[in-house]
């Protein structure tokens, strides 16, 4: 249920863009995100750090987009989030010498250290690739193409990547009972 709730702002953004234009779509994205945030808390009874970060970025970049009448802000948001994720995982490894994926999942999955590092490397590579791909698309293709990529391309890529990581983990890990 919460997962579906996270997709609603994207659906509203896409629909508003197709009916109106990027600034109205951005307002729909911001408003629906603000509404979905407490709804997510009501369902889960907890606030995820990733939800707070995502909402903050939507509001920051959305406000800049609408205030300055410049769609580049909302387009940059996707790349910056991906690049920050990859950079954060890389810095975590360099400073703590421990895989971030291990920190998140070690209570549920037993895996060798080198495999945890491989998961982190996959996430880092994916994050930098998707951030760069988003940047290329919004700089060199039409705004409509970028909206379609943001709505459908990122979703399909994320699902495919999750399947790849899940398959890798299932081959290397043993569930802790």
Image (tube, rainbow, N blue to C red):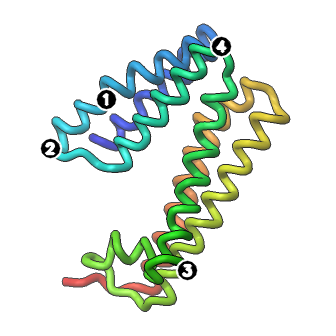
Q: Nearer the viewer, mark 1 or mark 4?
A: 4
Q: Residue at x 70, y 43 (%)?
A: 134
Q: Residue at x 47, y 17 (%)?
A: 28
Q: CA distance from mark 2 to mark 1?
A: 13 Å
10 Å neighbourhood of mark 4: few (<14), some, or many (≥20)?
A: few
The kind of secondary structure element at disc 4 is loop
Provide the residue designation for mark 4: 69
Name the disc covering residue 36, or none. Answer: 1
User: From the viewer's perspective, is 11 left or right of 151?
Assistant: left
**27 horizontally vs 144: left or right:** left
Horizontal and vertical percent position of residue 168: 51, 77
Question: According to the image, label 3 marks what residue?
Answer: 118
Marked residue nearer the N-terminal end (2 or 3) = 2
Most distant residue in the front direction: 95
Q: Is residue 139 left or right of residue 93?
A: right
Asked whether the residues under the numbered discs 1 and 4 touch, taking CB atoms below 8 Å apart as contact, a structural biologist would say no
The x, y position of residue 114, in whole percent, is 51, 89
Foreground: 129 or 145?
129
**Residue marked by disc 2:** 45
Residue depicted at x 24% and y 45%: 47
Label 3: state its secondary structure: helix
């Amino acid at each position: 249920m919460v997962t579906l709730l996270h997709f609603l702002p994207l659906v509203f953004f896409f629909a508003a863009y197709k009916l109106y234009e990027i600034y109205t779509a951005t307002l729909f994205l911001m408003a629906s995100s603000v509404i979905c945030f407490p709804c997510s808390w009501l369902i889960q009874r907890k606030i995820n750090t990733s939800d707070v970060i995502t909402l903050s970025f939507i509001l920051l970049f959305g406000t800049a987009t609408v205030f300055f009448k410049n769609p580049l802000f909302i387009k940059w948001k996707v790349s910056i989030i991906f690049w920050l994720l990859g950079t954060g995982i890389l810095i975590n490894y360099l400073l703590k010498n421990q895989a971030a994926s291990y920190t998140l999942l070690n209570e549920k999955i037993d895996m060798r250290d080198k495999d945890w590092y491989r998961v982190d490397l996959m996430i880092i590579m994916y994050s930098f690739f998707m951030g760069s791909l988003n940047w290329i698309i919004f700089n060199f293709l039409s705004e409509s193409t970028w909206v379609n990529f943001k709505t459908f391309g990122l979703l399909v890529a994320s699902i495919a990547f999750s399947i790849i990581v899940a398959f890798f983990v299932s081959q290397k890990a043993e569930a802790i009972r």
